[in-house]
Each structure stands twice: as C-alpha cells, then as structure tokens.
Image: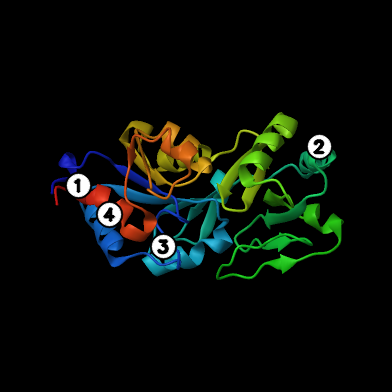
Amino acid sequence: MSPALFPYRLIATDLDGTLLRSDETISQRTRDALAAATAAGAAHIIVTGRGVAWTRHILDDLGYQGLAVCGQGAQVYHAGEHRLLTSVTLDRQLAGLALAKLEAEVGPLALAASRDGLDGEVIAGPGYRVQEGPLPVVPFTDPAELLSAPLNKVYVQHPSLDDDALTRIARETVGGLVDVVMAGPGIVEILPLGLSKATGLSLAARRLGVKSTQTIAFGDMPNDIPMFAWSAHGVAMANAHEDLKAVAHEITASNEHDGIAVVLEELLGR
C-alpha cells in the first residue's frame, strides 16, 4: 500500500491492557500489523505510564528504535540511542504537601514512587500492593525515603476506597497542587500539575514532524483520555475502563484478542 493511502502518520499505543497481553507478550498478529502500517508510512510510538526502566525490555524485544513516551508523559526516550531526551520530575515539596492534605482527608495511605532516570527504581512502602511484573520493586520503611531523590510520580493506595473513589477524592482535595490519574487496577498516581500522556506525545510528535490530526491512539484506562483528546482518532480496547470508552471514537477487540491489529488491518485494507 502506498504511504499516501494510509490515513495516519502516527500510531500511538499504550502498553498494559492495550499492546501487551496479560502475560506481557505481543502477539505475532499485532507485530505484523504494526510492521505493515509502518511500512505503509506510519510511525509507531509507545505511550505508557511505565517509567523507562520498566519499558526498555519491551522495546528491546520489539526491536524498537524510535521514540517512546514513558512515565505518564514525563519522559521522552530514544530507544535506538538509549537516552532520555526530556524528563519532568515531580516537585517533592508539593508532593509532600499533597500527600499530607490527602491523608488528612481519607486517612493513612500506602505509598510507592517511580524515581527519575534511565534506571529509575520503583520503590514501595509498607502495605503497598505491588503489581506483578518482570522488574523488582525496592521496599522502603522510612517515610523520608519516599521523597529523598528526584521522582516522576507517586503511587497511592487506600485500604478501603476503590480506585475510582480514591482518584475522585484526591482530585477534589489536591487537584490544585498536582494531577491525579488512574492508570490501571490498583494504580492511582500523583503527577506534576499539567502533565499527561498528551504532553509527552505532543513533544515526541513534534520531533517526528507529525501533527495531532495525523495521529491514531489506542488505550484502555482513564490516563489515556488526554491522549485521545489530543489525537485525531482514539480507539478504546474492549477491556477498557468505561470512562475511556465514553470518549473513544471507536471500540475494538480486547488486548487479548488483537484489538490493535483488528483496526490496523482494516485501515490497511486487509
């Protein structure tokens, strides 16, 4: 197919619940569809809430050489050169104030954080329920350790509030100090004010010479809403959160059933 016939120049995909299956693999069908779309003139860019350290092994497995937006938009990473192009950190004084205000409202929280940098660790405090993954999480017990080094975001969990309720209350309580997003089951994050996946994606797209009107985006969680708003066409997975489905232009099959490939194959005329 001629590149001129492919309707988008940029394909932006979330990772967890979108490009990746539950076992953290990418199906051959999806790999083939992405390869065909890039051969037809579109660039593929990964846009994930994971920090670079938790994303690089997936990029390497894909043979990915381009840009990736990591850390919920905080980091623009050049996979081919293995270097950070931009990185935004959370003001730790503001983060501490926000956490104090939120705990005054809802009671004690279990906390974790993603530290800045190519090898930024994820650290987790007492009671924080860590999502299973391929990389280790470093435990801490001294509360001072949470804000002891530059970080991109803080994770918060509550013993009784569900993710939706915690996100809503956090936004109402500290929304003027920081941004709050739900990125997945058990993953509510505190970010620098004004930061989103759309922020990082727009920076990366500018480097690629691509406009928002030339972009199709795939996602599954509320943290993908800004990316959908920025892009020309937002595609929610069948397994997506209802808030994202509500603003999507299209709903495809689930991440377990090659939802990205279904859409790309149709665009490719297959």
Which badge, 4 or 3, comes first in the chain's sequence?
3
Q: Position of residue 13 (x, y in %)?
A: 40, 49
Which residue is under mark 1? Answer: 266
Q: Residue at x 13, y 46 (%)?
A: 2
Asked if the residue under mark 2 is in contact with the one under mark 1, i.e. CB atoms within 8 Å, the reply is no
Towards the viewer: 151 or 165: 165
Query: Which residue type carries mark 4?
Result: Ala
The quadrant in which residue 133 appears is bottom right
Residue drawn at x 38%, y 48% as measured from the top left:
237
Looking at this view, is 119 or 158 the one in front? Answer: 158
Between 221 and 165, the residue placed more toward the observer is: 165
Amino acid on which the number 3 mark rests in the picture = Arg
Label 4 or label 2, whichever comes before in sequence order: 2
Of callouts 3 and 1, which one flags the residue occurring earlier in the amino acid sequence?
A: 3
Residue 112 disc label: none
Quick one: SS at disc 1?
helix
> In this figure, which residue is indicated by the disc labeled 3?
21
- Tell me which label, 4 or 1, sits earlier in the chain: 4
Q: Specify the amino acid type for callout 2.
A: Glu
Q: Which mark is residue 261?
A: 4
Q: Would residue 100 appear left or right of 3 to someone viewing this image?
A: right
- The label nearer to you, 2 versus 3, is 2
Q: Residue at x 79, y 43 (%)?
A: 99
| Nearest the eye: 210 or 44 | 44
Which of the two discs, 2 and 3, labels the residue nearer the N terminus?
3
Amino acid type at image mark 1: Glu
> Decide: marks 2, 3 in contact (CB < 8 A)?
no
Residue located beneath label 2 in the image: 105
CA–CA distance between discs 4 and 1?
8 Å
Question: In 3D space, how far apart are the residues under numbered discs 4 and 2 (Cα atoms)?
Answer: 44 Å
